[in-house]
Image (tube, helix red, strand yellow):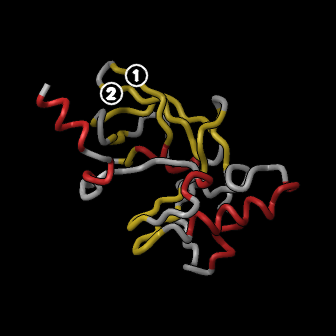
Amino acid sequence: EEFLNEISLLSDSDNNEDKKVSMMSIHSSKGLEFEHIFVVGLEERIFPIANDSNIEEERRLAYVAITRAKTHLTLSSVHSRFYKGKRESLSSSRFLKETNLFKIAPKPILTNNEAFKIGDVVKHKIFGMGKVDMVSKSGILYKLSINFGGNKKDILSSFVEKI
């Protein structure tokens, strides 16, 4: 009973000093500020969505997201992602380009099928050393069928290193 009485006197503001991560929609973040903000999914057809009819509303939301950061802002986009079972190539959001916060310098992606051939030995961070059994195209990358000591895996070429 004493414990319940003590707990009932505490408020949410008593725990504000704790380090925590809050994950929320941009709409939910309106009026709030945080030391660190991470905005992910900044690719065309994701943010903004494919439909241009509400582009100004989405641009305004991007502005809201960016201006929530007090000290650190991280904006993130990818070159490709799995969507509905397929890997799709994506371009960075126009909103990233419009910020003028930085110059976009994409990391090089392996796109040369000649880099891998059947019989090549490769290294994967988790599965270790393996031998390439098959090479096929998968979007802008290549899918490798690799035998890791009897454990066969299909892995994109960007996740392995040729030995």
Residue that label 1 marks: 152
Q: Is residue 52 left or right of residue 41?
A: right
Q: Is residue 111 visible?
A: no
Of all residues, the one furthest to the left in this rendering is 2
Question: Is there CB contact under 8 Å for labels 2 and 1?
Answer: yes
| Residue that appears at 47% across and 59% down | 38
* Dot 2 crowding, Cα within 10 Å, few <14, some 14–19, many 20+: some
Q: Is residue 88 visible?
A: yes
Q: Is residue 157 left or right of residue 57?
A: left
| Residue that appears at 24% across and 42% down | 9
Report, in whole angstroms, how far the alpha carbon at label 2 lies from the one at label 1. Answer: 6 Å
Quadrant location of the N terminus? top left
Circle 2: element type: strand
Circle 1: element type: strand
Where is residue 43 shown, x and y percent of the image? Answer: 65, 56
Q: Quadrant of residue 54?
A: bottom right
Q: Quadrant of residue 97?
A: bottom right
Nearer-the-camera pick, 132 or 35:
35
Where is residue 150 shown, x and y percent of the image? Answer: 32, 18
Residue that label 2 marks: 148
Q: Is residue 62 above or below residue 120?
A: below
